[in-house]
Amino acid sequence: MIEVVRIPVLSDNYVWLVHEPDSGETTVIDPAVADPVLAEVVKHGWQITQIWNTHWHPDHTGGNAAIKAATGCTVTAPAAEAGRIPTLDRAVGEGDIVCLGEIEAEVIEVPAHTAGHIAYLLPSECAAFVGDTLFAMGCGRLFEGTPAQMHANMQRLAALPPDTLVYCAHEYTLANGRFALTVEPDNRALVERMAEVEALRARGEATVPTTIALERATNPFMRAGSVEELAKRRAAKDAF
């Protein structure tokens, strides 16, 4: 039912534009900048009514003020980071529901990359917008949280339906996959996936969204069997 548009910005960010055609509502998820987003909605003939932020980092909120000024949209963001997102209109946390027309998004708290990071799950659309928590074959750096928190996040996301589309906020897949191969060089699914990723990137094409099934099969952080194993892998990736 929804239409999702990927907008590449900065060096490797993706801003997601989500349109619900019955209501005409459109939300922008994690706008790093404003101008490319505003240009994209003009191209589609849509009107931005909402912004959803997953966390406070400037490369996810930098476009909030200008988009809000241009459109009068409302900004929804994590309650735990309200003080760091000055454009905020609605603060949300675990279990809250955010609506785009008749489509419901459930808010889940996934702290670790930042202390108040959230994700938006759209069960009816089999979609999840996860910011910088889960990446294709990777996870976010632990800037404000712990390996235990990230391990819990990975297990929680792994429990979603396998065909869930995962919309993350960066094109990190090639580097993530190269690291993943150092962890599981004999993982056939991983080797095959990397061949596909390398071909996509050679053509300048995006590698996301991914799916929960793909991450279960190839993501070394989702596949970590313990907090200690995830911590070891995250430290190795940070130095990779």
Image (cartoon, helix red, strand yellow):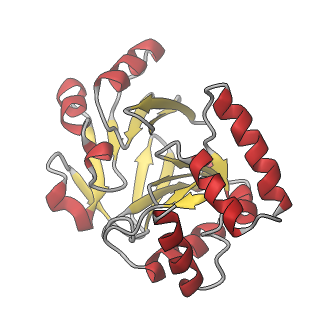
- Looking at the image, residue 198 sits to the left or right of residue 240; the answer is right
- Looking at the image, residue 194 sits to the left or right of residue 24; the answer is right
Picture coordinates of residue 84, whole percent (x, y): 17, 57
Q: How many marks?
A: 0
Q: From this viewpoint, is residue 118 visible?
A: yes
Task: Residue at 69%, 33% (x, y): give it.
Answer: 200
Q: From this viewpoint, is residue 126 visible?
A: no
Q: Is residue 188 above or below residue 144?
A: above
Looking at the picture, tell me which residue is in the foreground, 177 or 215. 177
- Looking at the image, residue 239 sits to the left or right of residue 196; the answer is left
Place residue 13 in its image quadrant. top left
Image quarter hosting the N terminus: top right
Picture coordinates of residue 178, whole percent (x, y): 65, 53
Task: Residue at 63%, 29% (x, y): give it.
Answer: 205
The residue furthest front is: 239
Task: Residue at 56%, 73% (x, y): give it.
Answer: 233
The residue furthest right is: 188
- Looking at the image, residue 60 sits to the left or right of residue 125; the answer is left
Task: Residue at 85%, 59% (x, y): give it.
Answer: 188
Picture coordinates of residue 36, whole percent (x, y): 36, 23
Place residue 135 in its image quadrant. bottom right
Place residue 154 in its image quadrant. bottom right
